[in-house]
Image (cartoon, coloured by chain):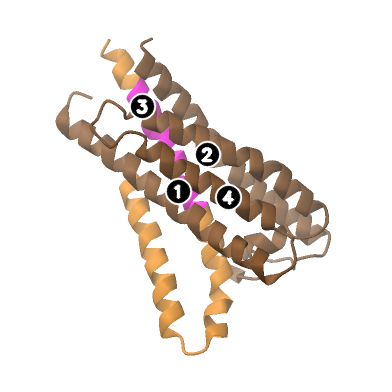
Chain colours: A brown, B orange
Amino acid sequence: MTKPQMISRDIARVALVLAILPTAVININYLIAASEGYVPWCVPYWDSCTSISATGQEGSAFFFFKSTMIPIAFIYLWYWKLADQALAETDHSPRTIANIGIIACVALICYTGALGAVGDSFRLVRRIGIIVFFTFTYLNQLLVLYQIHRRKLADPSR
Amino acid sequence: MQFALCLLILAIGVLTLSLEISLDNYDDYDDYEDAFEWILALLIHVNFLLAWWGWRTTTHSSASQG
């Protein structure tokens, strides 16, 4: 197996982990917070009864969220680094995807670190952190998709 | 498929912004904000699932090409 094939194989595995793990953590965290009475029982996807942040601010969910999301932030970083390597042969600006990934990862760590802390400045850190994380993660997903599309256009046999 | 999902995420993002701007009472928007957050988080991770499928297909096709 060639090096690009190995990177693609690794990146596929990491992408699967990132599809399952954070979604599971967020939902399990909600179940913990609701079972301890910190947030109401509902379907947050359409009842809009609680935010993701609110589920990780008190009780066991506070520790669960922090101890899982910070390692997951590094898995995101690993994914963007692999994506950057896999797409290195196309002529995108070197390390753009990895650098955007670093910003998203730092934002997620800041958000997770400020979770549960009292005060307006921590609230601001949480707000900026989650917006930057979502925006830059989405931006990187678009960028990867664009680079793959370009590569296919350049070499239709791929 | 992944491109369609990216467009959907963008549309939801634009919808949240336009709701925030257009609703006179901020509390009205506040009623929906949390649900948008949950849905966007879910969709971004569904995008990783589609990426897994895409990378997997790339590996298999390049391996079969030799």
Q: Which residues are magenta?
A: B42-59
Q: Position of residue B18 (x, y in %)?
A: 39, 76
Image location (x, y in percent) of residue A4: 35, 19
Query: Does the CB distance between marks 2 and 4 fall below 8 Å?
Result: yes
Q: Residue, x 69% and y 58% (percent of image)?
A: A115
Left of A54 or right of it: where is A139? left
Q: Amino acid at mark 1?
A: Thr
Q: Which chain's residue wears label 3? A: A
Graded by Cα atoms within 10 Å as few (under 14), some (14 to 19) or many (20 or more), the crowding at tag 2 reads many
- Give whichever of discs 3 and 4 has the lower sequence position: 3
Type of amino acid under label 2: Tyr
Give the residue displayed 65% in from the left and 67% down from the top. A121
> Which circle's residue, 2 or 4, is located before the other in the chain?
2
Same chain for the residues under marks 1 and 4 in the image: yes
Q: In front: mark 3 or mark 4?
A: 4
Cα–Cα gap, marks 3 and 4: 24 Å
Label at residue A137: 1
The residue indicated by pointer 3 is A86
Of the residues shown, which amino acid type is indicated by label 4?
Leu
Residue sitting nearer the eye, A78 or A1: A78
Q: Quadrant of residue B65?
A: top left
Task: Name the residue beneath numbered marker 4.
Answer: A108
Q: Position of residue B29 (x, y in %)?
A: 52, 79
First in residue order: circle 3 vs circle 2: 2
Q: Indicate the chain on which mark 1 is placed.
A: A
Q: Earlier in the sequence, mark 2 or mark 1?
A: 2
Return the mark for residue A76.
Answer: 2
Q: Secondary structure at mark 2?
A: helix
